[in-house]
Structures are given as C-alpha cells and as structure tokens.
Image (cartoon, grey):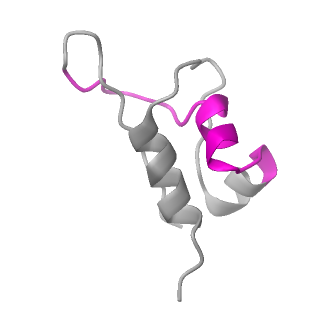
Amino acid sequence: MHHINPVIIKQNGKKATGTKGFSPNELKEAGVNKQQAKKLGIRIDVKRKSTHQANVDCIKAHTKPKS
C-alpha cells in the first residue's frame, strides 16, 4: 500500500522533516474520518493541531475516486 506524506512548512520557511502524519483537523476539512483514513493508508498524527491547505488538497486528491 502506498502512503502519502504531509508537507509541513516551519516558521522559518523550511520543510519539517520527520512528520508522522496528517492532523485530525486536516482530515476533518477534507471530509475523511479516522476509519476511512486507516483503510486508505493515510497516517494520522494526533499531536498536530495545525491545518495546511496543501495537505487538505493532497488528501482530497488521494481519496477522489479513480475514473
């Protein structure tokens, strides 16, 4: 199964390394619950509280039905 990784930009403009997954707020904004995320192989980091629009768009693109 293919995992997707979140992109997190720190305050100094650099990408954060070692991220554990998407925040619950990003999943909620994308319309995906925890069970669906687990089934799709999307990692969740419950400690993160921030929401990045790029990550929400990534989740939406990953969950969009393939045609």
Quadrant into which the N terminus falls = bottom right
Q: In this view, does 21 lie above or below 37?
A: above
Residue 32 coordinates in the image, percent (x, y): 71, 51
Residue at 62% x, 17% y: name it: 47
- Number of marks: 0
Q: Residue at the location (45% across, 31% down)?
A: 52
Q: Where is residue 9 in the image (x, y as percent from the top left)?
A: 30, 24
Decide whether residue 18 is among the magenta residues: yes
Q: Is residue 1 one of those drawn in magenta?
A: no
Q: Give the range drawn in magenta.
A: 14-35
> Is 45 left or right of 38, judged from the image as shown?
left
Side (left or right) of 56 relative to 42: left
Give the residue displayed 60% in from the left and 29% down from the top. 45
Please identify the quarter of the rendering in which residue 6 is found.
top left
- In the rendered image, the vertical position of residue 1 relative to residue 5, given as above or below: below
Please state if 9 lies on the left or on the right of 41 as rendered. left
Figure check: 61 above or below 49: below
Query: In percent of the image, x 67 and y 32: which residue is there?
Result: 24
Residue 25: x and y in percent read: 64, 30
